[in-house]
């Protein structure tokens, strides 16, 4: 039964990662259509084409044999492509710079919108349980050996039926030694611990099972409040990514701790979050959607950021960058990305990422 559960979790993980990529490609597709660029193909998956249909605009939609991600093919995206007579005005590279920028940014934009939607769903259903999802290192809980997935049952004979019960009982006993009854692996156990006195309130050092979001209190926001909070959280996550990137270059985060992660590693992380519950899984999809969205904005070819860089350069120069220069930059970018991917795959195999070790 456990084997079947793991298989289902991996299938969910593949579907989630594919959905993020499809949303990204849908962003490019939508902006291309809006900008008057002909979309030749929009396929879900890669490899042999199993099913396809052409719409009246000439776009071939279909499904390929390997259901992992997807892709667009835009007319004129490849500068060496021969443009059919009469279709010049529908070619990507014959469009004004602002339309090319809109198309290039579309993928990231849709990833961010998708993340906002997922966080909104997360907040709609988020409700702290009595199960521990995070133990603060060095806290009273850590020293007393509380573990992830422990579920609070009672404290000093008082039942704990929801997280608020735990918070109230704990805060009323600052600096006191108390007994908690927890459920671990289906069996009840007693843990005695001396609570920390934090500003006159008892403090244990744990957070509920919404593992990836322990810093956000769950509130009754209301419909418009939820929308606002979804955008706020997405912005906060973005700022965190930017700060982490800056800390990497400033040396505050050692290179050894900034290891790249391959699709193998990402799938493993997806599976772990799927095992933690659907709420954590939804939130993690949002995190990866944001990360992939901004990751594509790194200014190297063949990423979107590389295309944006050359669009801006050509706008300033008022003439195209020589094709040879584009090719050299593309070769360099592919080499960097493939090298990082190989390193990431090796690391993900010999030293798999685990949230439990955080």
Image (spheres, helix red, strand yellow):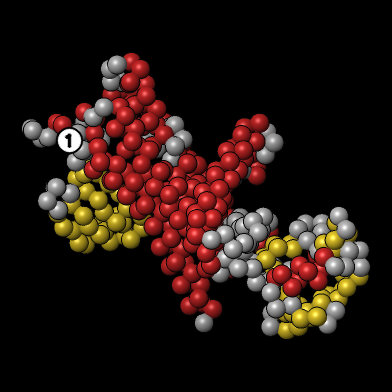
Pick whichever, 122 or 293, lies toward us: 122
Q: Residue at x 25, y 51 (%)?
A: 42
- Any part of residue 335 in sight: no
Pick whichever, 205 or 169, lies toward us: 169
> In screen coordinates, is 316 left or right of 290?
left
Q: Can you say whether 59 is above or below 325 in the image?
A: below
Q: Can you say whether 134 is above or below 60 in the image?
A: below
Q: Can you say whether 318 is above or below 200 in the image?
A: above
Q: Residue at x 30, y 27 (%)?
A: 97
Percent across and percent down for residue 338 are 44, 41
Which structural element holds mark 1? helix
- Count the numbered circles shown: 1
Q: Can you say whether 260 is above or below 246 in the image?
A: below
Query: Which quadrant of the structure image shows residue 303?
Result: top left
- Any part of residue 323 in sight: yes
Percent across and percent down for residue 153 are 74, 79
Q: Which residue is mark 1?
A: 90
Quadrant position of the C terminus in the picture: bottom right
């Amino acid at each position: 039964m456990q084997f079947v559960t793991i298989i289902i979790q991996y299938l969910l993980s593949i579907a989630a990662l594919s959905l993020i990529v499809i949303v990204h490609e849908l962003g490019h597709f939508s902006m291309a259509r809006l900008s008057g660029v002909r979309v030749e193909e929009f396929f879900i998956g890669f490899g042999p084409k199993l099913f396809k249909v052409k719409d009246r605009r000439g776009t071939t939609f279909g499904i390929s044999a390997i259901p992992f991600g997807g892709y667009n093919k835009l007319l004129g995206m490849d500068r060496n492509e021969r443009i059919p007579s009469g279709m010049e005005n529908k070619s990507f590279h014959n469009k004004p710079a602002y339309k090319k920028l809109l198309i290039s940014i579309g993928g990231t934009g849709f990833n961010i919108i998708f993340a906002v939607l997922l966080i909104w769903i997360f907040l709609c259903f988020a409700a702290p349980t009595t199960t521990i999802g995070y133990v603060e290192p060095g806290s009273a809980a850590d020293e007393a050996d509380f573990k992830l997935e422990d579920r609070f049952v009672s404290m000093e004979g008082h039942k704990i039926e929801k997280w608020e019960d735990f918070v109230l009982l704990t805060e009323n006993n600052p600096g006191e030694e108390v007994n908690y009854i927890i459920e671990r692996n289906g069996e009840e156990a007693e843990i005695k611990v001396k609570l920390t006195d934090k500003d006159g309130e008892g403090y244990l050092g744990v957070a509920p099972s919404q593992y990836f979001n322990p810093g956000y209190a769950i509130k009754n926001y209301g419909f418009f409040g939820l929308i606002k909070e979804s955008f706020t959280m997405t912005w906060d996550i973005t700022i965190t990514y930017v700060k982490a990137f800056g800390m990497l270059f400033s040396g505050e985060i050692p290179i050894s701790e900034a290891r790249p992660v391959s699709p193998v590693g990402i799938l493993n992380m997806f599976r772990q979050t799927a095992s933690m519950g659907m709420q954590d899984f939804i939130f993690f999809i949002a995190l990866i959607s944001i990360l992939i969205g901004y990751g594509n904005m790194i200014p190297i070819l063949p990423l979107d950021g590389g295309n944006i860089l050359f669009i801006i350069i050509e706008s300033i120069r008022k003439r195209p960058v020589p094709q040879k220069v584009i090719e050299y930059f593309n070769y360099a970018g592919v080499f960097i990305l493939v090298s990082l991917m190989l390193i990431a795959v090796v690391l993900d195999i010999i030293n798999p990422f685990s949230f439990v070790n955080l």
